[in-house]
């Protein structure tokens, strides 16, 4: 009885999305998860690379599952997995969706690596974005940029695309500074700041607020310009590159 009680005390269940995986030994994998209750988790899935594995494809990237885990000293162990949302299958079938999902997962991993407080909100945001991506609700690159802006806002770095990010003067303004937090007025503009088109700033504001009628009707040139500004904003606040962004195709 004591052995069973000890096992039960170290067992827990979570809803989690798979961020990434890598091989361990001949048949196992280390799975990096983002859970709704416990934040980021690194766990071992034993035997998952064997064709006879009980897990099947339930622990592939971007899958959302109900998991049972056993706490370990360094890595937890996944003992059960029940699929809740098989987003990974639809995403993996389209290269543009796959690269976008990879960039979102890498960003989520970086944001929740040290910030446990916002992990629950980051989990819900990521799962929502993956769902929209799997269903093809909007252009993949727009879903990505909207997710990136919202994820940073959830982490405490909300960009401003109307009022000046430094002095608060109402816009619209014609300059952008990642370091200062978004749109900046003429007086606050640092030397060398880019001057995006008015339509690009409107697109960025729409992506942050979820105004998809504006975002879906935006022009390709403004989408490309917005993507560059989002990437610089992400790099500045994370203080490191999101390497997967280089793989994302921009139309």
Image (spheres, rainbow, N blue to C red):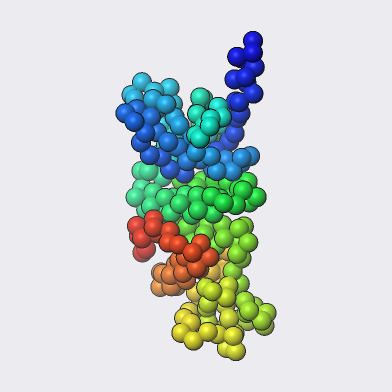
Name the image quarter holding the N terminus.
top right
Q: Foreground residue, 78 or 89?
A: 78
Q: Is residue 1 above or below residue 106?
A: above
Q: Say whether residue 157 is left or right of residue 227.
A: right
Is residue 193 visible in this depiction of the protein? yes
Q: Position of residue 59 (x, y in %)?
A: 44, 34
The residue depicted at 57 percent of the width and 66 percent of the height is 206
Residue closest to the eye, 242 or 98: 242
Tell me what residue is drawn at x 54 percent, y 74 percent: 179
Residue in front for this viewpoint, 138 or 23? 23
| Quarter occupied by the C terminus | bottom left
In the image, taking residue 222 as reference, residue 172 lies left or right, namely: right
User: Residue at left 50%, top 49%?
Assistant: 109
Is 18 on the left or on the right of 115, as rendered? left
Q: Residue furthest front?
A: 73
Task: Confirm whether residue 17 shows in the render.
Answer: no
Task: Identify which residue is drawn at 59% across, 85% down.
Answer: 188
2 lies above or below 183: above
Q: Number of callouts in the render?
A: 0
Whole-percent x and y of residue 145?
Answer: 49, 61
Q: Nearer the viewer, residue 206 or 2?
A: 2
Q: In the rendering, at what x and y percent does residue 102 appear? A: 42, 50
């Amino acid at each position: 009885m004591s052995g069973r009680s000890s096992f039960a005390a170290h067992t827990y269940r979570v809803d989690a999305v798979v961020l990434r995986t890598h091989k361990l030994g001949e048949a196992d994998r280390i799975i990096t998860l983002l859970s709704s209750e416990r934040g980021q988790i690194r766990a071992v899935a034993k035997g998952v690379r064997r064709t006879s594995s009980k897990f099947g494809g339930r622990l592939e990237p971007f899958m959302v599952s109900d998991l049972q885990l056993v706490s370990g000293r360094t890595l937890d162990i996944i003992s059960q997995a029940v699929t809740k949302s098989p987003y990974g299958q639809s995403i993996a079938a389209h290269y543009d969706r796959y690269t976008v999902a990879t960039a979102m997962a890498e960003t989520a991993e970086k944001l929740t690596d040290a910030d446990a407080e916002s992990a629950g909100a980051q989990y819900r945001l990521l799962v929502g974005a993956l769902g929209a991506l799997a269903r093809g609700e909007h252009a993949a690159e727009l879903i990505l940029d909207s997710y990136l802006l919202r994820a940073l806002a959830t982490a405490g770095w909300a960009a401003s695309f109307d009022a000046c990010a430094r002095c608060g003067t109402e816009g619209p303004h014609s300059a952008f500074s990642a370091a200062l937090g978004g749109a900046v007025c003429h007086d606050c503009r640092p030397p060398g700041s880019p001057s995006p088109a008015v339509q690009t700033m409107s697109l960025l504001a729409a992506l942050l607020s979820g105004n998809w009628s504006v975002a879906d009707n935006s022009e390709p040139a403004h989408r490309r310009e917005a993507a560059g500004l989002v990437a610089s904003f992400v790099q500045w606040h994370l203080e490191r590159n999101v390497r997967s962004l280089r793989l994302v195709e921009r139309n």
